[in-house]
Amino acid sequence: MVEYFEELLNRLAPMDPPDIEASHTDLPTDVNPPTEEEIRMAIRQIKNEKATGPDNIPAEALKSDIEVTTNMLHLLFKKIWEDGTGANGLERRTPHQDSKERRPEQM
């Protein structure tokens, strides 16, 4: 079996490689805050009886009244989106900015 994979994976590059066209890089990106329907769908997709996240809110609590949860989260996300700050007043950051600034012992 090892010989099979060695032969399969250790081949020489083809003399005439295929001419593959580059893909479009100007793909449309939605830069608007999530809609109420997107939030509602995301809440419905949360699995029940799983460990809570850092907010300690179980999925069952979020799903107990989806309309109220959706409205509250929509208002929160809209405020964060417009102000550029989170609920606790921190500026919005990209994930790589956070991880770069942490020391290895903090990760």
Image: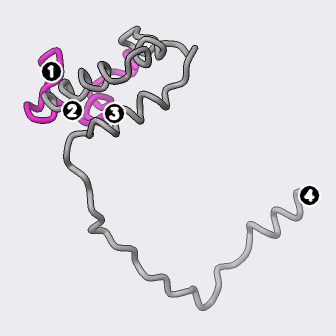
Give the residue pinned by disc 4: 1
Give the residue pinned by disc 1: 90
Do the residues bearing badges 2 and 3 touch, measured as CB atoms within 8 Å? no
Q: Is residue 81 left or right of residue 98?
A: left
Instruction: Tell me the residue at 21%/40% (across/down).
Output: 33
Residue type, numbered disc 4: Met
Is residue 106 on the magenta stretch? yes
Is residue 87 on the magenta stretch? yes
- The image quarter containing residue 15 is bottom right
Q: Is residue 6 left or right of residue 30?
A: right
Q: Nearer the viewer, mark 4 or mark 1?
A: 1
Q: In the structure shown, which secondary structural element does the residue marked by tag 1 occupy?
A: loop
Please rate how many residues cluster around mark 3, counting C-alpha atoms within 10 Å: few if below 14, some from 14 to 19, many from 20: some
Give the magenta-colored segment's residue range.
81-107
Q: Nearer the viewer, mark 2 or mark 4?
A: 2
Q: Foreground residue, 95 or 89?
A: 89
Which badge, 4 or 1, is on the more N-terminal residue? 4
Residue type, numbered disc 1: Leu
**Marks 2/1: CA–CA distance:** 9 Å
